[in-house]
Amino acid sequence: MNKGLKGEDPYNDPRRVNDNAAVDTDVAEQVDHDRVSAVMMETKRSLINIRKALARINLGSYGVCAKCGGMIDTDRLAIKPTAEYCMVCEREVEKKNGKK
């Protein structure tokens, strides 16, 4: 998957170095580069979360909140199988991290 994404990144095109692109072309390349970088970062983050969930399954702690030790609602796990926290603890963690 990353090879395909890297192929979409205009910064990986060796012809780009020799190209004296117009400002609008340069901006388009920057936007495409930023998009590819964001998708790659999100993909890596998702893979890490999936591996963590698989580890919890192997340890027998899947579905148990990592913060309070309570059970994570099955509806929540159906929507977000990689959930580490119950909804109450998730809200606390997001509030602590400045997310809404």
Image (cartoon, rainbow, N blue to C red):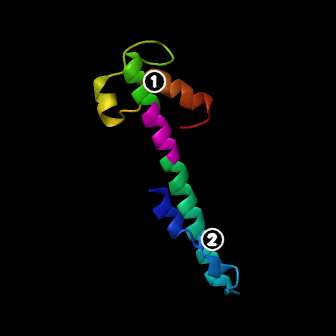
At horizontal 59% and vertical 76% (from top left) the residue drawn is 28
Apparent side of residue 57 relative to residue 30 in the rendered image (left or right): left
Whether tag 2 and tag 1 are in contact, CB under 8 A, the answer is no
- Residue 84 vs 26, above or below: the answer is above
x, y percentage for residue 57?
37, 23
Instruction: Between residue 19 and residue 65, name the one nearer to us.
Output: 19
Does the image show residue 83?
no
Q: Quadrant of the N terminus?
A: bottom left
Amino acid under disc 1: Tyr
Name the residue that disc number 1 marks: 85
Q: Main secondary structure of the magenta part?
A: helix
Residue at numbered disc 2: 11
How packed mark 1 is, by other alpha carbons closer than 10 Å (few <14, some 14-19, many 20 or more), is: many
Q: Secondary structure at mark 1?
A: loop
Is residue 63 inside the magenta stretch?
A: no
**Depicted 84 relative to depicted 29: above or below:** above
Instruction: Answer left or right for 76 relative to 94.
Output: left
Estimate the x, y position of residue 6 in percent, counting from the top left: 53, 64
Kindly identify the residue that appears in the image at 50 percent across and 37 percent down: 48
| Res. 15 in view | yes
- x, y (%) of residue 58? 38, 21
Q: Which residues are magenta?
A: 44-51
On screen, residue 38 above or below 72: below
Report the Cα–Cα distance between label 2 and label 1: 38 Å
Query: In the image, is residue 46 part of the stretch drawn in magenta?
Result: yes
